[in-house]
Image (cartoon, rainbow, N blue to C red):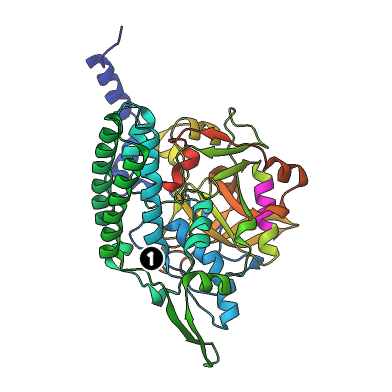
Amino acid sequence: MPRDLAPDVLERFAKAFDADPTARLLQNAVTKTQVDDVALDRRVVTSIDHSVSHLLDDWSATSQEKSGRCWLFAGTNLLRAGAAKKLGVKDFEFSQNHLLFFDKLEKANHWLESILATADRDVDDRTVAHLLATPSEDGGQWNMFVALVLKHGLVPKNAMPETASSSNTRQLNRDLATVLRQAARDLRARAASGATAEELAEAKEDVLGTVHRLLAIHLGTPPESFLWQWKDSDKGFHREGTMTPLEFAEAYVTVPLGDYVCIVNDPRPANPYGRTYTVEHLGNVVGAPPVTYLNVETDLMKRLASEAIVGGEPVWFGCDTGQMSNADLGLWDAGLYDRAAVYGTTPDLGKADRLLHHESLMTHAMLFTGVDLVDDVPRRWRVENSWGTEKGDKGFMTMNDNWFGEHVFEIAVRRDALPEDLRAALDAEPVVLPAWDPMGALAGS
């Protein structure tokens, strides 16, 4: 039988607290100060500086503002270093708004296709419920970034600059979600009444027309072409002429996007290493290669990331940035906060248990732009964030290596950097994880 919380138990808890002078002292502190400010371990903070032995960045940090576009910023930040070098400029940005527009439109189509594919299930089916809860999210994955660039190209930031809604997507997402959920209701009803595939496709296209109009109102109209001219760092003037977004991407993307693969560290016992995985209903561009992960051990991820940086190439990665991090200081360390001392607890959830028990999931994408090696072993990592220049080292952050092992889940690397046996494993049919699996969480808001 269930037991209630009895008065004598409450009394015992209160007396134990009152008898503990440390608990009373901490109560005094935390009732006046945020608990993380109290728990911040000064010994850890003072042991870290922002220097690294191998540094790539020589540019300004970007800002996603109040949006969930970290994955797009991390992707364009990876590409902009090569573009800036080719253009002869120190700083350069591709338009993240351009990619946001097409991501929202492509995602709407992908989502509606998933709604149609599950139209025979009850509305409270777990997969259908997950889809209905996430119709207009900002997030995404590396494969989704590549799919956008290959289909829709890139433009410089001045060809499609930021708008109020690209910098703060809350109201855009709210109204887009309403349009899509209403469409889901109507499409499911039409499917139940026996509509043909052609009739459902026409109805879906009508919805996408509304989505396009909504996006154009909020984000502006993507240019079909633009005049490209610029001044280099020596004030030399250049005019390339009129270019399409695909032509611009072909000219200024200096890395082979199609050669990159995603590797993850997912230590859950049900997901063995050396296998590929995908997440059901995850994606944006219908017909593009699926979002696929190769599961590997953390040490291999670290080695491949450090080798790429030493070789001159930044590394896109996904992590759980809310764990043991201080955005203002720009620091990540697995022991940054001594909350156990504050609460008198003994936290012992490992990485696998945190995933299994909903304590952790991928929440943010960024770019490794440096690594501090001691005898070829990583000690700390330099990170380009997309939270502006006010935090950390002018927008760049420092991650101790112990944090990487615990809270980094994914990196994008070139296929040929993998050991031969793992390259072969990439060709295996991926295991399909459910739509709500934490390995797909980066595609949320």
Question: Residue tagged by mark 1?
Answer: 97
Query: In the image, residue 64 lies at what x, y percent?
Result: 39, 63
Query: In the image, residue 361 lies at what x, y percent?
Result: 47, 41
Question: Of the residues shown, which amino acid type is indicated by label 1?
Answer: Asn
Q: Quadrant of residue 201?
A: top left
227 is higher (above) or lower (below) than 157: below
35 is higher (above) or lower (below) than 221: above
Read off the magenta span.
Answer: 300-306
Query: In the drawing, does residue 416 fall left or right of residue 199?
Result: right
Q: Quadrant of residue 27?
A: top left
- Quarter holding the N terminus is top left
386 is higher (above) or lower (below) than 182: below
Query: In the image, residue 415 lies at what x, y percent?
Result: 68, 52
Q: Quadrant of residue 101?
A: bottom left
Q: Secondary structure at mark 1?
A: helix
Q: Name the residue rendered at 41%, 72% in the picture.
A: 224
Crowding near the residue tagged with mark 1, few <14, some 14–19, many ≥20 C-alpha atoms within 10 Å: many
For this rendering, which residue is in front, 285 or 400? 285
Q: Name the residue rendered at 56%, 63% in the picture.
A: 49
